[in-house]
Amino acid sequence: AQKFVEREIEKQPAIADAALRLLFEGPTEIEKTDENFYHAFDTPYWMPEGEIIGPLSDYFKSVKIKPEKIAVVDFDKVAERYLDQPACAAASVMSPIIETLKQFPSVEEVEFSLDGEVITEWDA
C-alpha cells in the first residue's frame, strides 16, 4: 500500500531531481514511529546472503524530462538489483518514483535507464 505524503521543496531548476532525492530519504522519524511508514529504497531483504549493496539513492544519477512529457530516471547499473525483481518487489520500488514524478504537469510517463540505456523489459 502507498500513502501520499507532501513535502515542501524550495523552487529550483532541478526540482524533479530534488523531489526524487527527498523521496529516497524515506519517511521522517515521526512518520516511522507514529504512522509505521517504511520505504523500499534501503538494502532489501532479497539480496543473497553476504552480498552488500547500498541504498538506491547511492545509484541514482539523474532525471531528465523530455519534451514528449517522458521522465527518464537514470541509475548506475548496480540499481538493477532493486529494479529488476519479481513484479510486487519491483513495483514497491518503481511505483513511488513514478507517482512522485507524475505530480509534475510536464510528466505523463516515466522510463527507467541504467547507465543511460532505457530498459523497456525487465528479466524478472
Image (cartoon, rainbow, N blue to C red):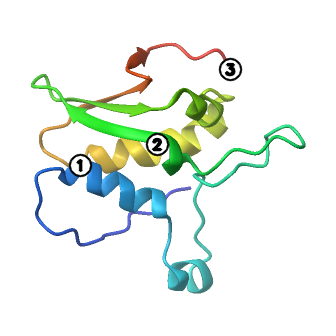
- Residue at image mark 1: 16
Which mark sits nearer the N-terminus, 1 or 2? 1
At a point 88% along the width and 43% down the height, the residue shown is: 50
Which mark sits nearer the N-terminus, 2 or 3? 2
Q: Could one spot residue 89 in this view of the protein?
A: yes
- Residue at image mark 3: 124
Q: Nearer the viewer, residue 29 or 34?
A: 29
Q: Secondary structure at mark 1?
A: helix
Judged left or right of residue 14, residue 40 is right
At a point 52% along the width and 79% down the height, the residue shown is: 31
The vertical placement of 48 against 37, above or below, is above
Nearer to us of marks 3 and 1 is 1
Cα separation between marks 3 and 1? 28 Å
Nearer to us of marks 1 and 2 is 1
Q: Could one spot residue 103 in this view of the protein?
A: no
> Where residue 74 sits in the image (x, y, percent)?
38, 31
Q: Amino acid at mark 3?
A: Ala
CA neighbours of label 3 inside 10 A, class few (<14), some (14 to 19), many (20+): few
- Residue at image mark 2: 95
Judged left or right of residue 35, residue 5 is left
At a point 9% along the width and 25% down the height, the residue shown is: 67
